[in-house]
Image (cartoon, helix red, strand yellow):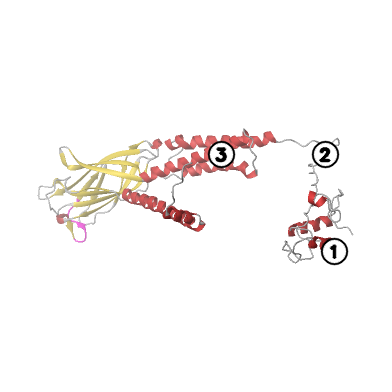
Amino acid sequence: MSEREPVTGIQSFFRRLWRRTRYRRVFYAFCIFCIWLVVVPSVYTLFLYQGGKMQTASGVEMNMPTGTTDFVEFWMVAQQADFAKHKVTFYVTAEPHGKYHRGHSELNSTVTAYFGAKEVVFDKDKKMQAIDLPIPILGYPRLFPFDSYSGSFEISLSEVNVDQGNATVAVPFRLSVYSNVQSITVITGLSIVPNYEDIVLADLLIKRTSVTVGFSIVIMTVMWGLALTLTTLAFQILIIRRDFNGPLLTAGITMMFSLPALRNSQPGVPAFGCASDMLSFFWCLFMIAVSAISILLSVVLRWKSRPKKEDGSANQLPVPAPMQPSPSCASDSTILSTDSIPPSPTEFSLGHQALYRGTPSFTQPDSARSSYLSSMSNPNESPFPYPSDDLAGLYPVNLRGPSIHTIQ
């Protein structure tokens, strides 16, 4: 036989520590806290990073000299995306600098801006108003949650220069694009159109965030878990003939009506028929429906009608046979009679009270009690925590068998 490895002091300490329930609970709580500390802050950091990601182009589009202060600055914030209508809306604000600025953020000259096909005129001696800019995008919503969209638009800025004979000249500008839409990421690429140095081309790439994709995958996994669990239960009930209670009959029907609500909890999910439905929802709904019907069908197939009497009335349920007295009590004819007469309602009530106490109460005859106590090694110490007038625990209670009574 191989010798056991010696147990060190540390191993012995941890073994003794693990035997205590309180320390095990503390250890489990510490493990749960560590998992929370790793998962939740990481996901939140990823959410902040993707939600606040910024693509900025400054100075290089218009070949502005280094350190110049004569330009117009634009900020574009993506605020709404409607994939069903294939458009994304930006909120655009602007502020003049240098020679284009006068007074309290007013324009020194009239400036015309072109955002794709939309023309916006900013009047002289007025503040540059904020605008909502819809941009058309192309994509395939049926690929949710793995869908992506793309779009592009041109940006240019010009003014009428009186000193140059009312000629139209380009106005340098700086553009910053922010993604502020929940559950999507807007990636912007800015470049100068070849042979047109005064026009900036903005390319958009819009896709779901990693948090949204991960959450959708979790929802699909939950739907598959519910469907497989109910399918296994239906197989056990219908094929293996497992016993079941009433609440299980409604489990499948409840899941079938709650599954669409679970499917619609995915952020930004389109109408029925997307990739998420083909991967989980349709199959799970079908499995749950078949399982629910199978469970109900098993109840119908197992039902049997009660046999009827000759007069047409249904028979009563069979009455169980009376219990037999314990062999240890059957020999004592002074306490227990073996007649098969069922107890009366009064005797049944008294017996039920005695059963609640754990034993019947006997006060007569005194000779039986005295003979029992004299046979004990120490008559003053009763083995039962009951009053001395009762022979507690001496004889069992039989409510359905022979009646229990004393013989005078």
Which residue, given by chain and number where applicable, does mark 1 sit on? Answer: 366
The answer to whether residue 365 is visible is: no
Q: Which residues are magenta?
A: 103-110
Circle 3 residues within 10 Å: few <14, some 14–19, many ≥20: many
Which three-letter amino acid code belongs to the residue tagged 1? Answer: Asp
Q: Which mark is residue 167?
A: none
Which residue, given by chain and number where applicable, does mark 2 sit on? Answer: 313
Could you tell whether 339 is left or right of 298 in the image?
right
Residue at 19 percent of width and 42 percent of height: 199
Could you tell whether 27 is left or right of 119 in the image?
right
Instruction: From this view, report whether residue 146 is shown above or below residue 386.
Output: above
Whichever of callouts 1 and 2 sits on the residue coming sooner in the sequence is: 2
User: Disc 3 on helix, strand or loop?
Assistant: helix
Which residue, given by chain and number where applicable, does mark 3 sit on? Answer: 230
Residue 371: horizontal and vertical position, in percent?
82, 61
Residue 40: horizontal and vertical position, in percent?
39, 52
Give the quarter of the image for residue 134. Answer: top left
Marks 3 & 2, CB-CB < 8 Å contact: no
Q: In whole angstroms, how far apart are the C-alphas of marks 3 and 1?
A: 64 Å
Q: In whole angstroms, how far apart are the C-alphas of marks 1 and 2?
A: 53 Å
Assign the C terminus to one quadrant of the image.
bottom right
